[in-house]
Amino acid sequence: VQLQACGGGLVQVGGSLRLSCEASGRAFSSTAMGWFRQAPGKEREIVAAINWNGRSTYYADSVKGRFTISRDNAKKTVTMQMNSLKPEDTAVYFCARRVRTSTAGYYTRNEDYDYWGQGTQVTVSS
């Protein structure tokens, strides 16, 4: 199982970016996915999560109303549209996939996930 994340970059305050994560391996459509981020000197934190069919999502309070997570099971991808970006959104963003037995819902803890992408840098300049 591999996860390839892309879409990060440098953007000004108020701008937008779209992160994508493509997964390899089987059974993508039955696995929960998540986006996390880690800023310098801080722990990795949940940003958004989505269940296997995309009907149940979670957002950290800090990004509610600005970020949208979605998935395309046919393409084995999960995306996160990030709007109205703020300097505090600056971090390395990681996609994560859970492959162990799951409920029908989403997962929000680091330890809930089994595989991680390599991370993509998002920098928001003021």
Image (cartoon, helix red, strand yellow):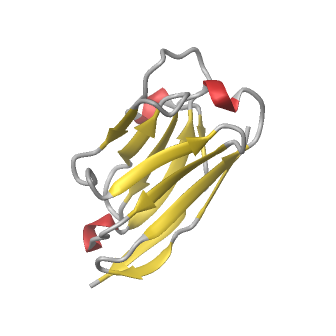
**Residue name at image x 39 percent, y 44 percent:** 48
Quadrant of the drawing holding the C terminus = bottom left
Relative image position of residue 117 (x, y in whole percent): 61, 50
Horizontal placement of 21 versus 48: left or right?
Answer: right
Q: Residue at x 45, y 47 (%)?
A: 69
Question: Would you identify the image quadrant in which residue 27 lies?
Answer: top right
On screen, residue 121 above or below 51: below
Relative to residue 98, is residue 87 depicted above or below? below
On the question of residue 32 being in view, the answer is: yes
Q: Is residue 35 left or right of residue 31?
A: left
| Total numbered labels | 0
- In percent of width and height, residue 16 lies at 41, 72
Residue placed most toward the observer, 60 or 73:
73
Q: Residue at x 45, y 59 (%)?
A: 81
Residue at the (49%, 68%) spot, across then down: 121
Q: Nearer the viewer, residue 126 or 113?
A: 126
Q: Is residue 2 above or below residue 11?
A: above
Furthest residue in direction left, as rendered: 61
Nearest the viewer among 45 and 71 is 71
Q: Percent from the top left, x then y, of residue 111?
A: 45, 30
Residue 67: quadrant of the picture: bottom left
Quadrant of the frame with the N terminus: top right
Q: Is residue 119 visible?
A: no
Give the side of residue 32 with respect to residue 40, left or right: right
